[in-house]
Every structure is written in structure tokens, then in C-alpha cells.
């Protein structure tokens, strides 16, 4: 469960969902740290993707649709990172809520 929260699996989003289902068993601090770590891992993956795609396209035996598999995976991970940044668990979001931002008023 812990590993599912801390480690990005580029091919299997179900691992994250399973980890999130049991996040109540971890401290809030660890869950927040894992979210920040995931965002960083996803950023590194996003930076790497064009290089991987370029190498794949250089291989004459690889069909061009292979590129789309990598781009689809990258897009899914970018969505995951955006969700983590926007969610109430994100540290910047928590600061906004503590200061009485609009979302804090609407949820109380």
C-alpha cells in the first residue's frame, strides 16, 4: 500500500487507486509527502518522454503508433499530477484553506 502511494506506475493506474483506498492507515504527513514525491516523479517522466519517443521513432522496425502509447501514458500522468496539485491534500491548497479562501468557506 505504501509503495503504491510513493511509486508511479506508468502502466497501471489501479495501483494508485488501491493505495488511495488505504491511505487512512498512514499519517497525513506521509500521504502529503507521497503526493509531492509523485508530482516530482511525474515531472521527470514528462521530461523524459520526448527523448524516449524520439529513440523509438529512430528504430525503423517500430510502428509510429508506438509513439501514441507513450504520449497517452504521459497525458494520463499529467492529469494525475494536476489532480494532486489541485486537491485539498496539496500543501499550497491547505495554506489557502487555512487562510479562509473561497473553498474553505464553501465547504464549512
Image (tube, helix red, strand yellow):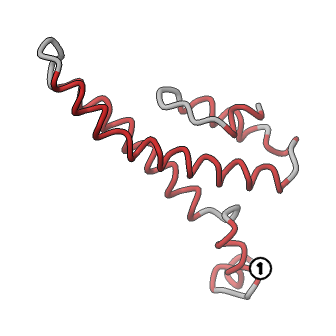
> Dividing the image into 4 quarters, which one contains the N terminus?
top right
Quadrant assignment, res 14: top right
Residue 85 screen position, x and y as percent: 57, 62
Q: Is 19 above or below relative to 62?
A: below
Picture coordinates of residue 102, whole percent (x, y):
63, 85
Observer-nearest of 47 and 98: 47
Left or right of residue 60, residue 84 in this image: right
From the viewer's perspective, is residue 12 above or below residue 25? above
Q: As drawn, is 50 to the left or to the right of 19?
A: left
Report the residue at 48% width, 31% height from top.
Answer: 10
Other-residue count near label 1 (Cα within 10 Å), few / some / many at <14 / 14–19 / ≥20: few
User: Is 46 in front, or is 13?
Assistant: 46
> Residue drawn 30% across and 29% down?
69
Question: Residue at label 1?
Answer: 108
What's the residue at 71%, 47% (across, down)? Answer: 34
SS class, disc 1: loop
Answer with the quarter of the image where residue 104 lies: bottom right
Q: In which quarter of the image is residue 41?
A: top right
Amino acid at each position: 500500500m505504501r509503495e503504491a502511494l510513493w511509486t508511479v506506475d506508468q502502466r497501471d493506474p489501479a495501483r494508485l487507486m488501491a493505495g488511495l483506498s488505504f491511505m487512512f492507515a498512514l499519517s497525513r504527513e506521509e500521504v502529503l509527502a507521497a503526493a509531492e514525491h509523485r508530482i516530482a516523479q511525474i515531472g521527470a517522466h514528462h521530461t523524459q518522454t520526448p527523448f524516449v519517443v524520439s529513440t523509438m521513432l529512430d528504430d525503423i522496425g517500430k510502428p509510429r503508433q508506438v509513439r501514441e502509447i507513450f504520449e497517452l501514458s504521459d497525458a494520463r500522468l499529467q492529469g494525475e499530477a494536476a489532480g494532486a496539485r489541485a486537491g485539498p491534500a496539496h500543501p499550497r491548497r491547505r495554506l489557502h484553506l487555512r487562510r479562509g479562501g473561497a473553498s474553505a468557506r464553501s465547504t464549512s
